[in-house]
Image: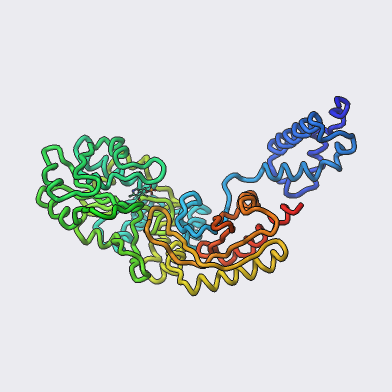
């Protein structure tokens, strides 16, 4: 065995060999060298285990294809495209919203070239980065002023820190939500230095609960949109109009964390009524915050809109500098918001809106097309059928709403469904689907048309590899 070790080709010989391969040659040489070293460690391991037991298997020609595959696999970027066939439109694990073409183009232009990010072209003087979206936000929402930060969590933190630091914020117990991961209202409150004053019970809060809570130390009344769950049954929240009236009487600002915050009215599409940002501001709420990449369908961002006197104070907060939005986000956000100037244009062009409002006939037709493609490419490897199912909006939005869809179901002939699901995670462009009733299901709602061929190719590769 020990004599076999001497027959392992040197790292340099592999490197020379890889010089011939364009895709490997372009990799950084130090990385290439390290990865070949790792590959040779693997070979030594195989000699020790007996998996390699003759000289011929150690010839450069015998190992080079495997070495190249190993290096190519290990050197690929970690952050990559995947195909979302889950039917969950705002899928947090998959990057929430994908952007409209206009937004992508704006990002590319804004990054490839210098920009007027903080330059007022009218005067040649220093400008504000918020100027690019503030007017648009005001026009779309009816607000007096607005600004944008890194995400909605940052927006909530900033509002609390500016308007309520060291003082009390009154919130209903029914609204002390946790939003996936680590965003919880009581914790964010603590970080901001504001003091949470909870009122009411988990299921019921009355106006008198707020009235009784207001005292010397009260800075603000806050409402949190309970976007990711619903309390049903014996339940009462105070009407926002009543909260606004109370705020006016006591001279206290009313802040609503809207979470998803949609500018688009989904109710004509059969959704249960959710207030738009415009409606919330119209009801008299002083400051509203919401996410850029949930129902809005833009980049990760936090939008704060409302009365000028409060927004001006928020803009001046030093914390803002740490939470500020970058130019790529700003470019994508402006382009996305511009589409909303015509709601029907936004519905067609903002992928999140187009996917959510896709009609049953359209989805059925697309499912049949995907099925034909798969059936053709998977002959003998799997049964493919179309069956009814449900998609979801995701991102904590419309939690109760099942969106009827047509699923394309794949039943492998000679592989278990779980292995297919896992195999698809390891393909060049991973395909994420879901398993339902023992079938691997693909939902056309979240698939782009140009992805059908990629999906078919990936499923075929995994099923064929499984046969070998
Ligand atoms: C999603 C959400 C947040 C956090 O927004 P991010 O943009 O993810 O930071 C805060 N509050 C509510 C009610 C939410 O739904």
Does 3 appear above or below 337? Answer: above
Total numbered labels:
0
- Residue at 50% x, 57% y is 109
Q: Position of residue 463 (x, y in %)?
A: 69, 56
Which is more toward the observer, 442 or 287? Answer: 442
Q: Position of residue 458 (x, y in %)?
A: 66, 57
Q: Is residue 198 left or right of residue 418?
A: left
Residue 88 at least partly seen: yes
Which is more toward the observer, 202 or 97? Answer: 202
Q: Position of residue 154 (x, y in %)?
A: 35, 44
Rendered image coloring scheme:
rainbow
Does 104 appear above or below 186? Answer: below
Residue 125 at least partly seen: no
Which is more toward the observer, 305 or 432? Answer: 432
Q: Is residue 342 left or right of residue 144?
A: right
Q: Position of residue 450 (x, y in %)?
A: 59, 65
Q: Which residue sits furthest left?
A: 249
Q: Is residue 327 left or right of residue 67?
A: left
Quadrant of the rendered image containing residue 30: top right
- Residue at 81% x, 43% y is 64
Q: Which residue sits furthest front?
A: 437
Does 71 appear above or below 300? Answer: above
Which is more toward the observer, 467 or 294? Answer: 467
Q: Which residue sits furthest top?
A: 2
- Residue at 83% x, 35% y is 52
Q: Is residue 31 left or right of residue 447?
A: right
The quadrant of the image that shows the N terminus is top right
């Amino acid at each position: 065995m020990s004599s076999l070790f001497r027959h392992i080709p040197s790292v340099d010989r592999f490197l020379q060999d890889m010089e011939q391969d364009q895709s490997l040659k372009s990799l950084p040489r130090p990385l290439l060298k390290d990865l070949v070293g790792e590959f040779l460690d693997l070979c030594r391991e195989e000699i020790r285990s007996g998996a390699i037991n003759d000289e011929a298997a150690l010839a450069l020609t015998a190992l080079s294809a495997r070495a190249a595959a190993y290096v190519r696999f290990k050197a690929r970027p970690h952050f990559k495209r995947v195909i979302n066939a889950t039917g969950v439109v705002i899928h947090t694990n998959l990057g929430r919203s994908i952007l409209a073409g206009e937004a992508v183009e704006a990002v590319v232009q804004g990054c490839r070239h210098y920009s007027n990010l903080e330059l007022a072209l009218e005067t040649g003087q220093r400008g504000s980065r918020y100027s690019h979206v503030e007017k648009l936000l005001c026009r779309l929402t009816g607000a007096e002023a607005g600004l944008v930060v890194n995400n909605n969590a940052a927006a909530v933190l900033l509002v609390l820190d500016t308007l309520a630091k060291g003082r009390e914020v009154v919130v209903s117990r029914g609204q002390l939500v946790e939003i996936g991961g680590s965003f919880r209202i009581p914790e964010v409150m603590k970080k901001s230095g504001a003091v949470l004053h909870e009122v009411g019970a988990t299921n019921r809060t009355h106006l008198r609960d707020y009235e009784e809570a207001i005292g010397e130390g009260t800075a603000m009344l806050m409402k949190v949109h309970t976007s990711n769950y619903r309390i049903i049954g014996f339940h009462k929240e105070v009407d926002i109009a009543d909260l606004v009236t109370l705020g006016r009487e006591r001279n206290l600002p009313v802040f609503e964390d809207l979470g998803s915050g949609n500018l688009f009215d989904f109710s004509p599409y059969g959704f249960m009524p959710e207030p738009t940002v415009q409606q919330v501001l119209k009801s008299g709420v002083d400051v509203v915050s919401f996410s850029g990449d949930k129902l809005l369908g833009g980049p990760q961002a936090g939008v704060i809109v409302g009365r000028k006197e409060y927004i001006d104070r928020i803009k001046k907060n030093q914390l803002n500098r740490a939470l500020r939005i970058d130019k790529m986000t700003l470019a994508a956000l402006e382009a996305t918001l511009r589409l909303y100037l015509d709601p029907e244009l936004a519905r067609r062009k903002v992928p999140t809106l187009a996917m959510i409002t896709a009609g049953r006939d359209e989805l059925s037709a697309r499912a049949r097309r995907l099925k034909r493609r798969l059936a053709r490419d998977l002959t003998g490897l799997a049964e493919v059928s179309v069956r009814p199912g449900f998609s979801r909006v995701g991102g904590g939005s419309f939690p109760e709403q099942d969106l009827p869809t047509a699923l394309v179901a794949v039943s492998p002939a000679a592989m278990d469904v779980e292995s297919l699901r896992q195999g698809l995670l390891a393909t060049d462009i991973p395909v994420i689907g879901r398993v339902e009733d023992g079938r691997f299901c693909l939902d056309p709602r979240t698939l782009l048309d140009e992805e059908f061929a990629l999906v078919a190719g990936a499923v075929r590769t995994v099923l064929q590899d499984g046969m070998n």
